[in-house]
Image (spheres, rainbow, N blue to C red):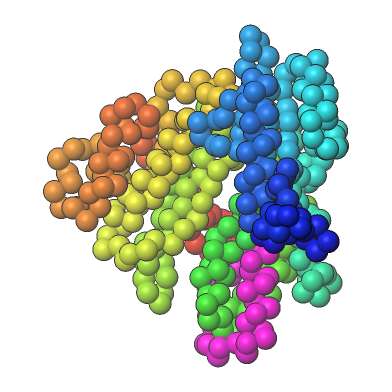
Amino acid sequence: MAQSTGFKDSIHPEYVCLLKKSLYGLKQSQRKWFETFSNYLLNYGFTHSTADSSLLIYHKNSVSIYILIYVDDILLTGNHDPTITSLLSALHNRFYMKNLGNVSYFLGMQVLQTSIGFHLSQTRYATYVLKKDAMSDCKPLSTPIASKVLSDDIQVLQPTQAEVYKQFVDSLQYLTLTRPDIAFTVNQLCQHMHSPQENHFKLLKRFLRYIKGTLSFGLPITKSDLNLTAYSDSDWAGDPINRKSTTSYCAFLGCTLISWQVKKQKTVARSSTEVEYRALATAAADIIWLRHLLPEFHIAVNSPTALFCDNISSIALANNHVFHARTKHIEIDFYFVCECIKNNQLQVLHILSIDQLADLFTKALSLSRF
């Protein structure tokens, strides 16, 4: 760094000012802010969550307080109002911050309190995306993607149109935070960002018409039992171009959906058993993380987590330690799932395909099925 004009010391011209805080806009500023803020909380009596470094927890006697940090946006909750008030007073004395009261809007997500819990949505953000593409007055549709896509329009988009396509798909990815119903379609759109074609742009326009008709859709959080369950599924060789498969899983805490993922597998699977087993391993990894996180909220996870799969061969492979001789190409996933079952962390159960909730994330469904 160089000394500012007019502040040079004639005796020590090489000297510069000593910074007392990080400069806003530098790459290190967010990290330095998090370090300063979290160190203050640690000295106050908080501890870092072992599952999520941005979550800080305060447990003392029967008092529990949780703080979740995203740069300078902070969520705070707890079960003891006097302690929370005391903490807020201490934070105000140390940092310049505003208390916005009960959460209603956080990182583009609207939080609506209902008679049975909460409802998370991104209506305002979705409306902005539609207005940005001049699709505010389009006719709505009932499904995000057609169950059968028949198009021979493979002309590559012009550079200006391709840039528009990339910008919109980027913005739509954030919408999946509260919209599991669009996860598969957004995943499909993202796969063509490197070289979008005319048919992909039509798919995007059709998808925006679905968003128009479902602006109020979101994620309900309701009071129920706190049993952790999960579903995993795969669409074997679903990509007609390279025959790669799509893996998906979703996890529920009671009747509330808390985690889900849609991902295209990196390699071509030679059997449906292989692709379903890879989905089991992906779901198992997420379940292990959730089982580490939930005890920090005083939620007991003593019994194995039920993981539902609709492929009998994969279930047999997970429970049979001898059956793996013909499946050496998925050996790592095999041992990982078997170890989870052996440690009573996981219980793989069969479910009929018609009841498989994760099916929503693997393929385009008909209107009635969707």
State yes or no: residue 158 in magenta: yes
Position in image of residue 170 (x %, y %): 64, 66
In this rendered view, identify the residue nearer to me: 142 or 290. 290
Position in image of residue 301 (x %, y %): 47, 23
Q: Which residues are magenta?
A: 143-172
Position in image of residue 13 (x %, y %): 71, 59
At a point 31% along the width and 27% down the height, the residue shown is 343
Q: Is residue 149 above or below residue 68?
A: below
Q: Is residue 109 above or below residue 95?
A: below
Tell whether 324 sits left or right of 295: left
Q: Is residue 124 above or below residue 63?
A: below
Q: Residue furthest top?
A: 61
Residue 219 in view in this figure: no
At a point 43% along the width and 35% down the height, the residue shown is 288
The C terminus lies in quadrant: bottom right
State yes or no: residue 364 in magenta: no
Tell whether 165 sits left or right of 281: right
Q: Residue furthest front?
A: 11
In this rendered view, identify the residue nearer to me: 294 or 233. 294
The N terminus lies in quadrant: bottom right
In this rendered view, identify the residue nearer to me: 239 or 295. 295
Position in image of residue 295 (x %, y %): 52, 23
Q: Quadrant of residue 33?
A: top right
Q: How many marks?
A: 0
Q: Quadrant of residue 32?
A: top right
Residue 317 in view in this figure: yes
At a point 17% along the width and 44% down the height, the residue shown is 323
